[in-house]
Structures are given as C-alpha cells and as structure tokens.
Image (tube, grey):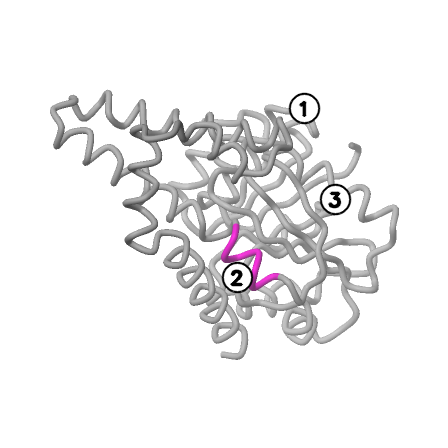
Amino acid sequence: MNKKIGFIGTGNMGSAMIGGLISRGTVKAEAILVSDRNGDSLSGAETRWPGISCSTDNSSTVKGADIIILAVKPHIYKAVIEEIAPLVDESKIIVTIAAGVTISQAETMFGKDVKIVRTMPNTPALVGEGVTAYCCNSHVSESEEREIIPVLESFGIVEKIGEEYFHSVIAVSGSSPAYVFLFIEAMADAAVLQGLPRAQAYRMASQAVLGAAKMVRETGTHPGELKDAVCSPGGTTIEAVRTLEKGAFRSTVIEAMNNCALKSKEMTKG
C-alpha cells in the first residue's frame, strides 16, 4: 500500500492497529503518522515502532495522511472532528472506531461531505486476532473501500455489514471478549478450588477456549455437533453441560447480549 495512514490517538486500539500494520508489512513505519496530546504515549510509540512520525498536533497528522483513523474515546469525537474538519478534503478517508457514533452523526460533526468508514474492532486486535465489522458512507468508492480492507485485516478478520447491524456486532464481538474473560476466570477459579495451581489453571482454561474456537472456525462444524462429540453417554462432560443448562447458561448469554445491544442503541440516541 502506498497510502499514508494517520492515527489520532495512541490508546489500546490505535496501538493494536499500528502494530498490526507494521508487523504484517501492510505499510512501512515511515508511512504512519501519529498524534496524541499525551507526550508519554507518543514517546512509547516512537520507541516501539521506530520510523513512525509522531506529533502532539492533530493538524500535522491530518495534512500528511490519506487515511485518518480516529482512535479516540467517543466522548471527545466532536471536539476532535471540529478541530480537523477544515483540513479534511475529498481526497482523505476518515475511519471511525467509536461505539455510539453513527456515520450520520460523524457527517453532521464534519458539517460537509466527507468519506467515512465506520468500524467496530475488538480488543483481541492487540494480539492480531481481532474481529472488525465495517461499513462505508456513499462518498467512499469501491476502490477506496478495497484500500481500507487490508488496513483492517492487519489485526484480524473483517466483515462488511449494514450499519443497522452494528448494535448486534457490538454484542457479539465488540463487547464479547469480556464475557469470554469472565468464563476463563470462572473455569480457572473452579480448577483452583479443586487444587490446581492458579497459573496452570489460567493457561489450561485459556487454551481450551482458544482450541475450541479454532475448531469451530477451521472445521466449519456446527458448535452443537462439536459439543455432542465431547459428551459421552453418562460421562463427565454431559454432567457439566447439564449443570450449566440448569443455571440457564445459554439463556443468560442471550439475555446479556440483548442488553448489550440495547445499551448500544441508547448510547447512539444520546
């Protein structure tokens, strides 16, 4: 890719994206511009990725970049956009990563026609295993969309969806790492209760989740069928599954995700 990519913000998600772009060779470090008002964050970025251009001035990043990723918290989007809007022209593509900020809302903040790609990544992007959903506004051409996809693929898999499904995406991938972390912690706690050292419990529980997820992805087999294959008649696994179902395991997960999506809708309205 010959484009220059600018990041406004160097938090967890911005750092994950920068690291993925460089480690996968999507762009060279010299093609990345970063701005952040936090000098310590910038120093850390310069040390970690030699060659990137760093500044505390957002305008310098916007002027020099073809693709600008707004990697800041949702509550400061308006202030950042108002600052950079005069410098954004029809040649630049804006990528948003904030929950609760729709394309329409971002367009209103800019106050003019701007090319916007709305995305929703998740924190496993930090280890190159993220999921990112995206959609584009009408000003983004097909060729420009093709340029954005490798950027998003640099830290995980990418799915194009209609913007109306973003609330579901937040529930199923954006927020779901927290559910999985909770599940791993619970499994490890149970193993510790049964006498297993905690460090081993965490390694084994996390690897079990990783391996099970990989089986679903790589075999294409329905998760229910994979579950059935582990449940021998009268065995230990079916006993554990029975106990989970007695506690309304699946229904609780569904209810939690429904509430997550509802909260996302409330945030968007606000």
Boundaries of the magenta span: 166-172
Q: Amino acid at mark 1?
A: Gly
> At numbered mark 3, what does the secondary structure look like: helix, strand or loop?
helix
- Distance from disc 2 to disc 1, alpha carbons, whole Å, reads 28 Å
Instruction: Report the amino acid beneath label 3.
Output: Ile
Q: In the image, 143: left or right of 25?
A: right
Q: Callout 2: few (<14), some (14-19), or many (20+) C-alpha neighbours within 10 Å?
A: many
Residue at horizontal 27%, vertical 28%?
202
Query: In terms of depth relative to the viewer, which is nearer, 93 or 235?
Result: 235
Is label 2 or label 1 in front? 2
Crowding at mark 1 (Cα within 10 Å: few <14, some 14-19, many 20+): few
The picture quadrant where one finds residue 103 is: bottom right
Disc 3 versus disc 2: distance between alpha carbons? 19 Å
Q: Residue furthest bottom?
A: 270
To which residue does mark 2 refer?
A: 99
Identify the residue shown where x is 19% and y is 35%: 190
Furthest-front residue in this view: 233
Indicate the amino acid at tag 2.
Answer: Ala
Q: Residue at 82% across / 57% down in the picture?
A: 140
Magenta span includes 32: no
Marks 3,1: beta carbons within 8 A:
no
Q: Which residue is mark 3?
A: 148
First in residue order: circle 3 vs circle 2: 2
Residue 44: where, in percent of width, then height?
42, 34
Name the one closer to the observer, 243 or 62. Answer: 243
Task: Name the residue that disc number 1 marks.
Answer: 25
